[in-house]
Image (spheres, grey):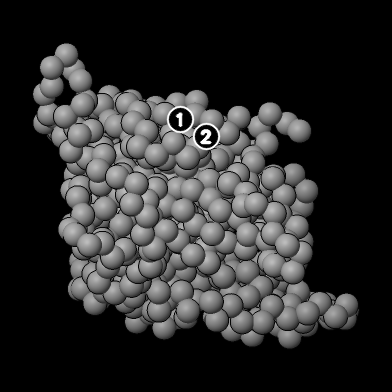
Amino acid sequence: MSPFSILRRHRVAALLGAALIISPVVVSFAQNPGNAGLSNVVATTQTPVAGITAPNGSFAPVVATTKPAVVTVTTVMKAQPGATDDGSPFDGNSPFDQYFQQFFGDQGIPMPKTPPQQAPRQEALGSGFIVGSDGTIVTNNHVIDGATSTKVTLDDGTELPAKLVGHDAKNDLAVLKVKASKPLPTVKWGDSDKLMTGDQVLAIGNPFGLGGTVTVGIVSARNRDINSGPYDDFIQTDAAINRGNSGGPLFNSSGEVIGINTAIISPSGGSIGIGFSIPSQLAAGVVDQLRQFGETRRGWLGVRIQPVTDDIAESLGMATAKGALVAGVIKGGPVDNGTVQAGDVIIKFDGKDIHEMRDLPRVVAESPVGKAVDVVIVRKGVEQTVKVTLGRLEDGEKLASGENGSTGEDKGDKAAPVSTASVLGMTVGELNEQTRQKFGIAADVSGVVITDVAKDSAAAERGIQPGEVITEIAQESVGTPKDVMDRIGALKEQGRKNALLMLASKSGELRFVTIRMD
């Protein structure tokens, strides 16, 4: 077995951190193309957190006030049939797929063998912390996911059954509730936005079943995107975090919770000094919603987006590549009235700058449902502000899941000859009944169909496939092969180096691509 294999007892929810955090500081990003590795992130303007001073630099005063509120979470669940010790939380989609480790108890602690007539069970351990004296506890969702029963062990050894109040798989957060005979000690949230790279932090948890373990380190980086979901914004720390630490708190030197320990990179299963925590500015808002409603209630804009690359920015006449490009508008969503249109670039949302695509989902998700917000867009090179009333993301997901429509079937029928044109390595033709049937294109898709793509052409390099439909070129609709040729010719006359194409898939999903016109 490879030393980078991942030992897992069962598959848990994918890590989805930082949906609601909005950092007021200016952050510069140096992201590798294609998410080939972790971004190097440096916060350029931050305010230090005032810490508790202690003799000889000891953290004992902080530990004394916080450790009583840190708990061990024990879950019992049915063993997964055919489960193996190998598996990745990201199903092959992450560049860290081979060695990313969720560690709350992935190996679990096997229960004694049960008689054959009983269903096999597994027991696993994680961590948590008390945020309400009434017994409200925060942990990771993957700690309790699939559990048939959960108990909490307090710092003094008291064991209490726990009830699930609510959970959020997108952010990997869960809220539990226990009944105690007296008010329980609590910890307070800190402001993770004020953290500086290099600040000292403490992790307290239950690594390998060793409850109450304290480790110390620093903030190694902020705003880490580990390619685990749309809201990634993790705190990276070198404080030792191991299996069983999941769901436990990361404290600043003032004894405030500024993160929830969630994942590590590890070739061996143990800490190598690369751990990730969900920022408190995200977690606190989600926890409040789970406590109040038992579920999340996120804002929803109702658009599909993609990054603004240098090529796309040049094609749109933008001086710099920034913001989020609207690739499509979801039917029935908040902006389906034409307020925001495909091809718009969103550069500011509710007063917050959108530096890159991944900023937008977070700022929208943290906004209240039903709030009217100002959205600054660039449309055909002109900056303008539109007013949008947000919907609810959870409702939007239900709507979006049913809107894909039929992709049709290629029945092998020979299409009748159609007028065609060759441009930029593509052969394009009229979109009619024959070509719809041949390529399985939905009835509500309009434009010019791509019937062939030349090997090693500019179009092939951009991943364009036969059966896709060109709906716009440079934000102008096209309906015939001649329209395509005319638009490309006009762009060349204007001195443009790239052509911006809006393409529709067979089912109508939209995306933008740029093609060099050299």
| Image quarter (top left, top right, bottom left or bottom right) of the N terminus | top right
Q: Is residue 500 left or right of residue 218?
A: right
Q: In terms of secondary structure, where does tag 1 sit?
A: loop
Q: Which residue is mark 2?
A: 265
Who comes first in sequence, dot 2 or dot 1? 2
Decide: few, some or many residues near mark 2? Use Cα within 10 Å; few <14, some 14-19, many ≥20.
many
Q: Is residue 46 visible?
A: no
Q: Spatial distance from mark 2 to mark 1, Cα to Cα?
A: 6 Å
Label 1 sits on what residue type?
Ile
Q: Residue at x 31, y 63 (%)?
A: 178
Q: Is residue 399 left or right of residue 3?
A: left
Q: Residue at x 58, y 33 (%)?
A: 269
**Residue 265: percent from left, percent from top:** 52, 34
Q: Nearer the viewer, residue 23 or 121?
A: 121
Q: Is residue 43 left or right of residue 407?
A: left
Q: In terms of secondary structure, where does tag 2 sit?
A: strand
Label 2 sits on what residue type?
Ile
Q: Nearer the viewer, residue 357 or 234?
A: 234
**Residue 490: percent from left, percent from top:** 51, 58
* Label pair 2/1, CB-CB below 8 angstroms: yes
Q: Is residue 213 left or right of residue 469?
A: left
| Image quarter (top left, top right, bottom left or bottom right) of the C terminus | top right
Residue 274 numbered mark, or none: 1
**Residue 186: percent from left, percent from top:** 20, 50
Quarter occupied by residue 403? bottom right
Q: Is residue 4 visible?
A: yes
Q: Nearer the viewer, residue 313 or 23?
A: 23
Q: Nearer the viewer, residue 242 or 111?
A: 111
Q: Residue at x 22, y 62 (%)?
A: 181
**Residue 339: percent from left, percent from top:** 31, 75
Decide: few, some or many residues near mark 1? Use Cα within 10 Å; few <14, some 14-19, many ≥20.
some
